[in-house]
Image (cartoon, rainbow, N blue to C red):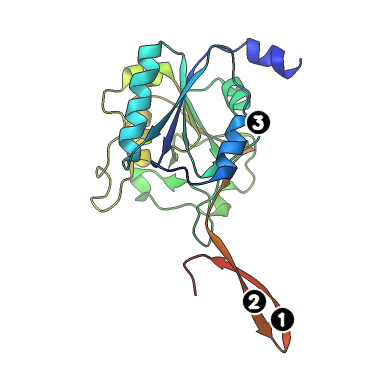
Amino acid sequence: MDIQERLAKQDGGYVGIACADLARYTAFDIAFDHVKFPPDTAYRRLPGLSVAANYNAAVRAMFEADKAWLWIMDNDHVFPPDILLNLLERDVDIVTPLYLRRLAPFLPVLHGDESRGYTRYNFNYLKGKSGLVDVTADGTLPTGGMLIRRRVLEMLTDPWFETGQIDSEYGSWDIYFTEKARKAGFKLHVDTDNCMGHIMPLALWPVCIDGEWRYDIREAYSR
């Protein structure tokens, strides 16, 4: 089955892109321009300082447009053109592609659940796992790139995404949303077959080691 046939089998949905007032990364726009969308899919860029508010606006727009699913995306990622179709074909409640934190040591963006104090998992958590990984019992998911079925959003109430509920000093809208969904009986999955790149500012520094010049890659705000 070619990709157009695969796309035709999917219902149309809604894509909400949380972004700043000014575009951050051209690489994101290039990646998004190449995404393969099912027929009758709509999307909207949602500028604003609050990611949670942007996501909530996307949910409301999805309901207004009467779509079957919502794909929420942040504009600091890159991804292959078929990522959305692959996620749709998983046919699960909630699924997020696997990606890494933008800060060293660049761990997977996966947390333990409430019983584990929301501890960040390292790569050992994924050891021996492949494909679609069910994290419902012991984890929460990030919201960047998350595909959510309409039935989930119908069960939960507005506002779906809220800040300050897990930690007063951090947003944590992603953790709180997935906790609410899990407690409502929905399944959470991370898709290790579908990964995204997480864009971060990097700087190349010339360094001299033992008399030989070479380059060193550092985070842009490092010295």
Q: Is residue 172 visible?
A: yes
Q: Position of residue 221 (x, y in %)?
A: 47, 67
Q: Residue tagged by mark 3?
A: 81
Q: Secondary structure at mark 2?
A: strand
Exactly how many numbered labels are in the figure? 3
Residue 80 location, quadrant: top right
* SS under mark 3: loop
Which mark is first along the chain, 1 or 3?
A: 3
For the point 42% across and 46% down, the residue is 112
The mark nearer the N terminus, 2 or 3, is 3
Q: Picture coordinates of residue 21 (x, y %)?
A: 38, 41
The image quadrant of residue 208 is bottom right
Question: Residue 121, image x and y in percent?
Answer: 48, 52
Q: Is residue 71 left or right of residue 26?
A: left
- Name the residue located 36 percent from the left edge and 31 percent from the top edge: 55
Label 3 packing within 10 angstroms: few (<14), some (14-19), many (20+): some
Badge 3 amino acid: Pro
Picture coordinates of residue 95 (x, y %)? 51, 30
Residue 192 seen in the figure: no
Say what amino acid the circle numbered 1 marks. Answer: Trp
Residues at circles 1 and 2 in contact by the CB criterion of under 8 Å: yes
Q: Which residue is mark 1?
A: 213
CA distance for labels 1 and 2: 7 Å
* Residue at figure coordinates x 50%, y 45% from the top left: 76
- Mark 2 or 3: in front is 2
Residue named by callout 2: 206
Separation of residues labelled 2 and 3 (CA atoms): 35 Å
Q: Is residue 166 left or right of residue 204?
A: left
Q: Looking at numbered disc 2 in the image, what kind of residue is underneath it?
A: Pro
> Disc 3 and disc 1: Cα gap in Å?
39 Å
